[in-house]
Image: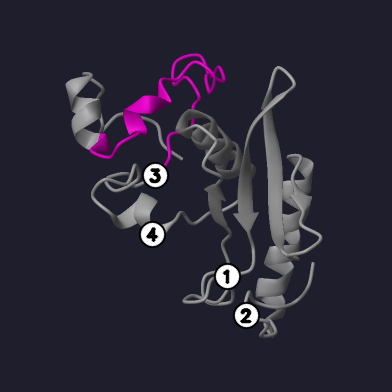
Amino acid sequence: MIRQNKDGKPIFSDKVWNQILEYGKMLEKLGYEESKKSPNLFYKNLTLKDEKIGIIFVDLRGTDYIPIWERPYPIVYHNEYLKFIDFIKEVVRLKRLGIDIRLSFFDKFEPEGWAFFLKEIPIGICKRCGKDIIEEVDWTVLENGAYNSKLQNNSIDINNSKLL
């Protein structure tokens, strides 16, 4: 890892730099690797039955518009081959580990983005028994925007759902 933003400007804050280093360690525990060509950019090849299904990226370099020292949280995105359902499961794993993340502008702020109405990402843990149900949840309820209306249409109580 290198102590600089995406545009090559140095990170002066020790607090921000230490947070970035800690995120790097946590990402490695989850199986992410740091890019050799782009320091502070982590990636993970996701596989299903030994077949590559896509790549997820966790970017600790900031953006051209928001330097990493202004919002020291990684941006999470994926390549076009990764299905939404596999992406959201990995986002949940990152959040469970305690990594505060940012999503793309489209995902978060456009009316058709999946997180437009979403205040928090569901944790994927059964409220009654405490079982990890990340593989059993129908994550498509978050896909294609209109999160709240889909929950209401599926008789899911928005106010009593457990969120991260």
Does label 2 or label 4 sit earlier along the sequence?
2
- Determine the residue positioned at 49% across, 27% down: 124
**The magenta stretch spans residue 79:** no
User: In screen coordinates, is 141 left or right of 36?
Assistant: left
Tell me the amino acid under the disc marked 1. Answer: Gly
Mark-to-mark CA distance, 1 and 3: 22 Å
User: In screen coordinates, is 19 left or right of 115?
Assistant: right
Does label 2 or label 3 sit earlier along the sequence?
2
Residue in front for this viewpoint, 101 or 113: 113
According to the picture, the residue beneath numbered tag 4 turns out to be: 105
- Determine the residue positioned at 74% across, 45% down: 32
Does label 4 or label 1 sit earlier along the sequence?
1
For residue 69, above or below residue 141:
below
- Tell me the crowding category of disc 3: few under 14, some 14 to 19, or many 20 or more residues within 10 angstroms, Cα based: few
User: In screen coordinates, is 145 left or right of 27?
Assistant: left
According to the picture, the residue beneath numbered tag 2 turns out to be: 7
- Determine the residue positioned at 39% across, 31% down: 162
Q: Quadrant of residue 24?
A: bottom right
Tell me the amino acid under the disc marked 4. Answer: Phe
Q: Which residues are magenta?
A: 121-147
> Could one spot residue 98 in this view of the protein?
no
Label 4 close to label 1 by CB (< 8 Å)? no
Element at badge 1? loop
Mark-to-mark CA distance, 2 and 4: 19 Å
